[in-house]
Amino acid sequence: IITSCDLLGIKYIVFPLVDNGKLENSEQERVLKDGLGQFDSILSASGIKIIFESDFSPNRLNNFISGFSPDNYGINYDIGNSAANGFDSDDEIDAFGERILNVHIKDRLLNGATVPLGLGNADIPKVLKKLNAIGYNGNCILQTARAEDGNHIGALCQYRDQLIKWM
């Protein structure tokens, strides 16, 4: 996979450590770290980075990512998932912001589902301002709610325009 991503110019492989892929104990974390460690030289040679999407608290995610080389590993920050978990974006970005390599723009209700941008608990303008303050200049990917009326292109255009205003 790493070699194929390199050939295609793909820079990141996202490892979703949420839902059914959630790490539930330190043994699972150790097994993951040991398993991925065997690919460090391939990652270094290719320039591909593995980025983790997680539902860990800010301090736990900071502790987790600190066990991985910043040359090969980073964080995929999902704004909506963090809001759904009740995390404060300032605390998160202060804890591990320098390791964020990719951002999912999404809005969710606290302990709930994805909703249209601006209708959930994510304070997206605040997050964007904080990311800007730390010099983040990576991807911002719309991972938004689908259109209830089936006009997905229209909804995406609306979300894009809203994101541009917030930026």
Image (cartoon, grey):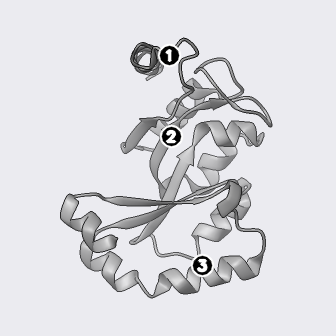
Foreground label between 1 and 3: 1
Left or right for 101, reference 96: left
Which residue corresponds to the image point at 80% horizontal and 37% vertical from the top-left? 111
Vertical relation: 142 (above or below) 85: above
Quarter of image, res 114:
top right
Which residue corresponds to the image point at 58% horizontal and 71% vertical from the top-left? 66
Foreground label between 2 and 1: 1
Tell me how far mark 2 sits from mark 1, CA to CA: 22 Å
- Helix, strand or loop at label 1? It is loop
Tag 2 near tag 1, CB within 8 Å: no
Quarter of image, res 82:
top right
| x and y percentages locating residue 152 in the rendered image | 45, 19
Name the image quarter holding the C terminus. top left
Q: Residue furthest front?
A: 150
Left or right for 147, reference 152: right
- Helix, strand or loop at label 3? It is helix
Q: Residues within 10 Å of mark 1 (few under 14, many from 20)?
A: few
Which residue corresponds to the image point at 52% horizontal and 57% vertical from the top-left? 75
Q: Amino acid at mark 1?
A: Gly
| x and y percentages locating residue 20 in the rendered image | 69, 59
| x and y percentages locating residue 70 in the rendered image | 45, 69
Left or right for 150, reference 110: left
Mark 2 or mark 3, earlier in chain: 3
Which residue corresponds to the image point at 58% horizontal and 77% vertical from the top-left? 67
Vertical relation: 34 (above or below) 76: below
In the rendered structure, find residue 150 and report the number of the disc placed on it. 1
Nearer to me, 18 or 101 = 18
* Residue named by callout 2: 104
Q: Amino acid at mark 2?
A: His
Quarter of image, res 33:
bottom right
* Residue named by callout 3: 32
